[in-house]
Image (tube, rainbow, N blue to C red):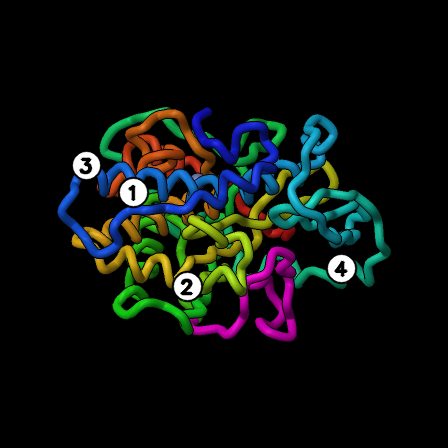
Amino acid sequence: MDDPVEQGEGAQDPDGDRRRRNHPRHSASAGAAARFVRNLVLIAVIGCVAFLAAGLAYGDPRLVGLLEFRVGGGDPADRSAGSGQTGQAETTGQAAQPGVQPGAAGRAADAPPPGLEESDSPLGTPEPPAERSDSYKFLAVNADGTPVGYSPCRPLHYVVNADLAPEGAAGLVHDAIKTVSRATGIRFINDGATDEQPSEHRAPYQPGTYGDRWAPLLVAWTNPDVAPKLKGQIIGTGGSTHYSYGDGPKTFVTGSLELDAPQIAEELDRPDGAAYATAVILHELGHVMGLEHVDDPVQLMYPEIGAPDGLASGDLNGLQELGKAQCRKDL
Ligand SMILES: [Zn+2]
């Protein structure tokens, strides 16, 4: 693995996040040099993504016992379901600590009523990739080998905190989400603006803010002061929270994507800035949906290259598989 941050599984090396980039910020003359620097930037970008992604994996109760490092700390929420089984919510960067808390009449205090907006069948159909490729990996898989993803039988709501969004950048997020929606078949619903700020310990259920449902996917244009993981070269982070009953199958219920608005504003000043920013957003959305890095440099999920061409065959095949995740009326 060439990702300096992901290597060692700890993302524990803070130096890897803090190399300064020294390219001329207002010069578009040196194509090769610019691309090299671009790649350096993306290494850092993806390093941080790996940080969160790894945290998600470490939250897996099947993994925490096997891995030495954990990313961050947390206070996982436990609940009991109507069946009496144990449930647990795990957020990126948090360690899982299974437990039981008595719930009231089949309804846990830290979760919305199950099955909201859940249909009997997937709401959409993934657009078949132009070519087959197995050049993709999942952040987490269930015991039966199926990838952990979002239920395709309910819409995935999202909100955007665009207070700091660079001029002309807001549309990039919506376009990228449309692209991912086509690739997965997942139906996204734009719930509009939010003033919610990103948090490493974001609660997946926030009835006071979003009503009696799982919190929507949060897309936040922010900065390192608000989101410390964006310090240094890091330009974006992303991840999702999965939920399960005991050792049962996991399904993502919400997620977040943080974009470093000042850095992206600089990138957008470059000739192909929009394509680069889009590649970053798509890469992060790939993680949100459940894709892990791959060693294939052609793919957008490769840790070191910001493929300006967008999603490649492996990315698309992986997203298609994620769109086949099982429906969850019980969540
Ligand atoms: Zn990544």
On the image, numbered disc 3 is attached to which residue?
32
Q: Position of residue 83 (x, y in %)?
A: 78, 48
Circles 3 and 1 in contact, beta carbons < 8 Å: no
- Mark found first going from the N terminus, 2 or 1: 1
Q: Position of residue 40 (x, y in %)?
A: 35, 39
Query: Residue at 50% across / 60% down in the picture?
Result: 224
The local crowd at label 2, few if under 14, some if 14 to 19, many if 20 or more residues have their Cα within 10 Å, is: some
4 or 2: tag closer to the N-terminus: 4
Which residue is at a point 16% across and 54% down the rendered structure image?
271
Q: Residue at x 68, y 38 (%)?
A: 70
The numbered disc on residue 189 is 2
Instruction: Tell me where residue 251 sits by quadrant.
Output: top right
Q: Residues within 10 Å of mark 1 (few under 14, many from 20)?
A: some
Is the residue at mark 4 in contact range of ligand 1, meaning its CB lies under 8 Å from it?
no
Cα separation, mark 4 vs mark 3, equals: 55 Å
Asked whether residue 170 is drawn in magenta, I would say: no
Q: Amino acid at mark 4?
A: Ala
Q: Which residue is mark 1?
A: 38
Q: Is residue 158 visible?
A: no
Q: Residues within 10 Å of mark 3 (few under 14, many from 20)?
A: few
**Callout 1: SS:** helix
Q: For marks 3 and 1, give the CA distance.
A: 10 Å
| Cα gap from disc 4 to disc 1, whole angstroms | 46 Å
The mark that comes first in sequence, 3 or 1, is 3
User: Would you say the residues marked 2 and 3 are in contact, meaning their CB atoms lie under 8 Å apart?
Assistant: no
**Percent x, y for residue 207?**
64, 71
Q: For the point 45% across and 31% down, which residue is it? A: 3
In the picture of the structure, the residue carrying the numbered disc 4 is 108
On screen, residue 238 versus residue 22, left or right, reads right
Q: Position of residue 161 (x, y in %)?
A: 45, 69
Q: Magenta segment, which residues?
A: 192-215
